[in-house]
């Protein structure tokens, strides 16, 4: 669906078109739509950590409202949420666009704009939206992995180290 009548917070009016995830455990990208949404929910319940960019502010409420029967105010998964947008916002004192952070950290920029995705979906450009979502997931994954190596560079020239759960601090092989 497109943006709801009441804007980006109208989760019921919007619906979920496509959900793309990178599954570290299976080392593969997964795509979910209405036909396999139960698999998506189960995957998010089975994993220990969910990494997103603005997942707490947008993706999780949208998924919860449309794909789960979890009451408002309760989480549909016990996984630890690492929301890179929230962590960066906390350190900078203001929100930073994913595209800006990608560019500052030498990662290819976004392939489109989130505001265009609902319009493309409504126009039947399912492949375009799916490709956009997969690219966003890959770039968010790259940014997360980059954050594990050291401080992230920000558009205002600051370097910030993100606090992640201690079990992510290694050792890695």
Image (cartoon, rainbow, N blue to C red):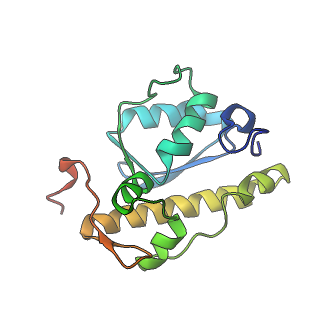
Q: How many marks?
A: 0
Which residue corresponds to the image point at 37% horizontal and 52% vertical from the top-left? Answer: 24
Residue 110 in the image: x percent, y percent? 58, 69
Which residue corresponds to the image point at 72% horizontal and 43% vertical from the top-left? Answer: 7
Most extreme residue toward the front, as rendered? Answer: 93
Task: Quadrant for residue 32, please give it.
Answer: top right
Residue 137 vertical placement versus 1 (above, below): below
Residue 23 vertical placement versus 35 (above, below): below
Left or right placement of residue 124 versus residue 95 in this view: right
Q: 111 or 155: which is nearer to us?
A: 155
Quarter of the figure that contains the C terminus: bottom left
Quarter of the figure that contains the N terminus: top right
Task: Quadrant for residue 159, please give it.
Answer: bottom left
Residue 31 vertical placement versus 92 (above, below): above
Residue 136 in the image: x percent, y percent? 55, 61
Residue 96 vertical placement versus 5 (above, below): below
Which residue corresponds to the image point at 55% horizontal and 35% vertical from the top-left? Answer: 61
Residue 49 in the image: x percent, y percent? 34, 43
């Amino acid at each position: 669906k497109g943006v709801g009548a009441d804007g980006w917070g109208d989760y019921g009016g919007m619906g979920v078109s496509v959900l793309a995830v990178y599954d570290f455990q299976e080392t593969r990208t997964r795509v979910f739509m209405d036909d396999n949404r139960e698999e998506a929910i189960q995957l998010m319940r089975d994993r220990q950590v969910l990494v997103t960019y603005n997942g707490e502010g947008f993706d999780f409420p949208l998924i919860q409202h449309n794909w789960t029967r979890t009451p408002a105010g309760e989480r549909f998964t016990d996984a630890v949420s690492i929301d890179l947008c929230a962590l960066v916002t906390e350190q900078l004192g203001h929100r930073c666009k994913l595209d800006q952070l990608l560019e500052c950290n030498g990662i290819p920029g976004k392939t489109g704009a989130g505001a265009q995705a609902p319009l493309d979906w409504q126009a039947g450009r399912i492949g375009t939206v799916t490709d956009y979502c997969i690219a966003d997931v890959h770039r968010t994954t790259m940014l997360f992995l980059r954050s594990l190596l050291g401080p992230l560079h920000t558009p205002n020239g600051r370097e910030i180290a993100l606090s992640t759960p201690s079990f992510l601090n290694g050792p890695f092989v």
